[in-house]
Image (cartoon, rainbow, N blue to C red):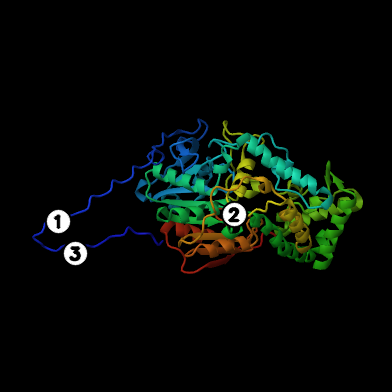
Amino acid sequence: MKRLAPLLATVGLVATSLPLLTAPQAAAAPTPAHMRQKPDWHRCSPDQPATYECATLKVPLDYQHPEGRTLDLAISRIKSGNPAKRRGVLLFNPGGPGTPALHRPLALDEQMPKDVRDQYDLIGFDPRGVGRSSPITCGPLSPAEEGVGGAYRPETFASDVAWARGIADKCREKSGDVIPYITTRNTARDLDVIRAALGERKISYLGYSYGTYLGAVYSQMFPQRADRFVLDSGVDPQRIWRGMIQVWATEAEPAFARWTRWAAERSEHYGLGATPEEVSATFWRLVERADRDPIVGNGQKYTGDDLRADPSLFFSPYGASAAIRYLKSLAETGRPPAGGEPQALNQLRTGPRAGGANASAAPGAWAPGPAEPSDAEGGATPVYWSVLCGDTDAWPRDPEQYARDAARDKVKYPVYGDFASNIKPCAFWQRPMEAPTPMKTRADVLTVQNEWDPITPLASGQGLHKALKGSRMVLALNGEKHGVYLSDPASCADATVNAYLGTGRLPAADVTCQDPPRFP
């Protein structure tokens, strides 16, 4: 990896009879207190391994005034079991924004190959504002308030505006003194506090989903501190953040077309149509029918909007086919087909959640600790909107702009376009305190991407790779999940990631590998 080396001035010394005159040296600025901390490590929990240790650091609420108010920053570690092979530390972020990660080293410790694992102390942390890191709250939130917004209809747009304004008002009322400082740039600064507290000159990093953007920002703010960085399931820095919601709509269209082809090839089993055109027509007839009269089954009602509520459904042809077959049977006969309710229906019930599970791509389930709040009181949703709204001023402030965009995109991208472009709480958020981080500095990082990632689609991952000059990309063809490295089943990309984490050598060129189809 290219480093920013210290500038060494070579001065020729000339013998002279004149006395050597030197200008007095300015005193070096003292190291701020938050960069001089030493963690007080302790066992995280009596029911967890003794090797899993926790500590709490203090970080400035506002880095422009570091002597002022502070926030707690909860960190964890599992040390390398082979000190002779230890290289340094590997920090980890699973995505979000707003996903706690204090417990994630436990999963990594089990899943990483030993020759890679031995090189690092695994470091987890709850990002500022969530979990055990001074959690913020917007008050109790309803399920609707935990979503990212609904479909656009002119007759309900006033309610959409009230929904967006209501979330912004709740967050301002409950946590308005902290929310302006819950941003990616400040979280990147927190990472550097962790680095200093651990006594490390550099950090290595594994970030998934939103964690790729956090890692990219760190690589630009602290390029001399970045060692081996793996950015898995990439966020395009040019799309933050409205564009990252809208990319769900643009990329759902090719995913939908792929699904219709897949289902048509299996028409004898699913009965959705013998051609892609017939499968598409079947879906849109179901949407129209459910708009008139919701489809009822197993205690649930599905409207036409519900059938479009989560574009990620169509990135898995098997899941989409099972769900649409189930709903088609309910609509036509009032009874479900044989085989029970498909798991994919859960996506239609909830849609994408703000900072919810589908925003985290990392392997290993997060097990909450006893002191961590639920999403209803704090958790992911307040941090999700704080980051999305506080990182950039690219959100329109005029509600009518959202109405125009949503009406346009409902026609251009019928699966999800109006959902993506409809109004969001950021329309009523306070203006950001900093501009987004420009991606100008060379960053020799490894980006990793599935071809059919439903949350950070391929176009987004390619945008991250393009933005980070010096990066390499590993693309797993046929990959459908959100999250590549250490996923189950294992990805063809794992070997390249392991080689980079183990040696620090990037591939000479971008790598494309091919996973077997999940459901042939």
Q: Nearer the viewer, mark 1 or mark 2?
A: 1
Is 519 on the left-hand or right-hand side of 476? Answer: right
Whether residue 301 can be seen here: yes
Q: How much space separates mark 2 and mark 3, taking CA atoms?
A: 55 Å
Element type where label 2 sits in the image: loop
Q: Is residue 162 above or below residue 402?
A: above
Residue to which mark 3 is pinned: 12
- Label 1 crowding class (10 Å Cα cut-off): few <14, some 14-19, many 20+? few
The type of residue carrying mark 3 is: Gly
Which residue appears at 53% of the width and 60% of the height? 447
Q: Tell me the quarter of the image containing the N terminus.
A: bottom left
Assess whether mark 3 and mark 1 are in contact (beta carbons under 8 angstroms).
no
* Number of the label disc, if any, that sits on residue 20: 1
Mark with earlier residue (1, 3):
3
Q: How much space separates mark 1 and mark 2, taking CA atoms?
A: 62 Å
The type of residue carrying mark 2 is: Gly
Q: How much space separates mark 1 and mark 3, taking CA atoms?
A: 13 Å
The type of residue carrying mark 1 is: Leu
- Label 3 crowding class (10 Å Cα cut-off): few <14, some 14-19, many 20+? few
In percent of width and height, residue 374 lies at 64, 35
Element type where label 3 sits in the image: loop
Q: Nearer the viewer, mark 1 or mark 3?
A: 1
* Number of the label disc, if any, that sits on residue 148: none
Given residues 166 and 236, the one toward you in this image is: 166
Q: Tell me the quarter of the image containing the C terminus.
A: bottom right
Q: How many marks?
A: 3
Mark with earlier residue (2, 3):
3
Residue to which mark 2 is pinned: 483
Element type where label 1 sits in the image: loop
The part of the image, by quadrant, that contains residue 383 is top right
